[in-house]
Amino acid sequence: MKSNGQINNPRRQFLGSVASGVAALGISTIVSPLVAHAENHFSTNSNDPDEWFKQIKGKHRIVFDVPGPNDIFPFAWPRIFLATNTATGTPEKDCSVVVVLRHMAIGYALEDRLWAKYKLGEFLKAEDPKTKKPATRNPFSKPNKGDFNVPGVGVVPIGINELQDSGVLFAACNMAIVVYSAAVAQAMNLDAEEVRKDWLSGVLPGVQVMPAGIWALNRAQEKGCSYCFAG
């Protein structure tokens, strides 16, 4: 504990700086791009976020809430859910798994180029699971074979692309993209709107941008998914 009573916590300090940056930007700076993006991205039936959730049809349904980096667990637990259901008689095709990447986990929805360009490992306090240092690429986007080796289990396929191959659905929070891209832009003295567009252009294939992560969590539970906190 610091002498002034504040907790000496790097994440708390970072969030404080983000909050200050957001306050300086003004609420219209946050809301206007969000509304504009929602109108453009979800204007057709094929991009209707509610329509996306109609893919949830499995016998066993679960949504993993990922608000922040948590080592390998946000991606290991969906694999464990599928593997243990298969072992107990329910194949992958009869399970529905949704992973919602929001808040400080939003970087996992973005391609390697953006991690290197904006130093997302440092900004989002996301470590590389192998080096335990700030990640310079998205460690869960197309990992190399053998990157994730769990004691007692062995190599586990927990890359986002590998989970998608098993039917796992990934959603990303648009509000987090708006807020964190603006905070990064401010820190790097860049144009917030251009950075936001850059982030949206680098969303991983198959990851659906949602109006907000909590919005997506609500919709998944309305579709019968049980809730699991994974961040």
Image (cartoon, helix red, strand yellow):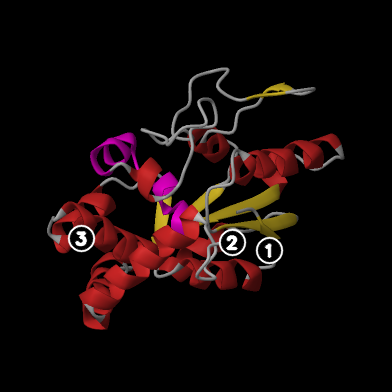
Q: Are marks 3 and 2 in contact (CB under 8 Å)?
A: no
Q: Residue at x 65, y 52 (%)?
A: 96
Q: Which quadrant would the C terminus be assigned to in this image?
A: bottom right
Residue 115 position (above or below residue 30):
above
Q: Secondary structure at mark 2?
A: loop
Which residue is denoted by mark 1 in the rendering? Answer: 225
**From the viewer's perspective, is 217 left or right of 133?**
right
Numbered disc 1: secondary structure: loop
Residue in the picture at 43% in, 67% down: 49
Which badge, 2 or 1, comes first in the chain's sequence?
Answer: 2
Q: Position of residue 163 (x, y in %)?
A: 57, 38
Residue range in magenta is 103-118
Observer-nearest of 108 and 45: 108
The picture places residue 70, in percent across and down from the top left corner, at 59, 46
Residue 114, position as x, y percentages in the image: 28, 41
Amino acid, disc 2: Met
- Residue at left offset 73%, top offset 39%: 80
The residue indicated by pointer 2 is: 1
